[in-house]
Amino acid sequence: MELDALYQEVILDHYKHPQHKGLLSTYDAQVHHVNPSCGDEITLNLTLDNGSISALSWDGVGCSISQASVSIMSDLVIGKNVAEARVILDSFVELMQSKGLKTGNAEILEDAVSLAGVSKFPARIKCALLGWMAYKDAVLSASNK
Ligand code: ZN
């Protein structure tokens, strides 16, 4: 898999220095998602406060794409309200479905545009989406409380 060198550095940086990794003991919802095709696993704890993501923590194992992606996602959604985070999530899913044809909206996606190249590799898209799908699931579960 070949990704742009600068982007590779962003991904590697998040992989080596994951943001918000380490599960907080209090949460509204906890989810555990796995990507069997690669062996990636993520547990994610989420707390909502008045429709905003007041806390999100995660723990996981797996490839650099999956772990960097959940780290990037955490940075992006914490402090946002659920509707704002939804825009980011939808934008990222669209990017991952673009088969390498889109570069992503950097204003919305920030560091997540570094994963744009992954969309050319169908086998890796699930790696990149794992943390985001865990977040989506956790929001649903926390909102239904
Ligand atoms: Zn993976």
Image (tube, helix red, strand yellow):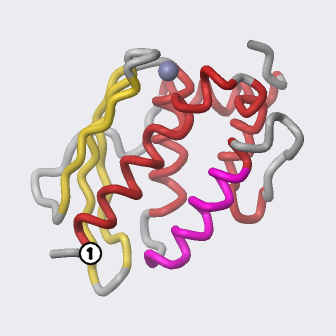
Question: How far across and how far down the image is residue 123, in percent?
Answer: 61, 20
Residue 110, magenta (yes or no): no
Which residue is at a point 67% across and 25% down the rendered structure image? Answer: 122
Magenta span: chief secondary structure: helix
* Position of 39 relative to 127 (above/below): above
In this figure, which residue is indicated by the disc labeled 1?
143
Which residue is at a point 19% across and 59% down the rendered structure image? Answer: 29
Which residue is at a point 46% across and 30% down the rendered structure image? Answer: 67
Image side of residue 136 versus residue 91, left or right = left
* Position of 39 relative to 33 (above/below): above
What quarter of the picture does the C terminus occupy?
bottom left
Q: Is any atom of residue 23 visible in this view?
A: yes
Question: How far across and how far down the image is residue 38, in percent?
Answer: 45, 15
Which portion, as a residue range, is magenta? 81-94
* Position of 109 relative to 143 (above/below): above
Q: Residue furthest left?
A: 25
Residue 83, magenta (yes or no): yes
Image side of residue 133 versus residue 98, left or right = left
* Mark 1 neighbour class, 10 Å CA radius: few under 14, some 14 to 19, many 20 or more: some
Q: Residue furthest bottom?
A: 50
Q: Is any atom of residue 14 visible in this view?
A: no
Instruction: Please tell me in which quadrant of the rendered image residue 142 appears.
Output: bottom left
Q: Nearer the viewer, residue 49 or 10?
A: 49
Which residue is at a point 76% across and 64% down the rendered structure image? Answer: 107
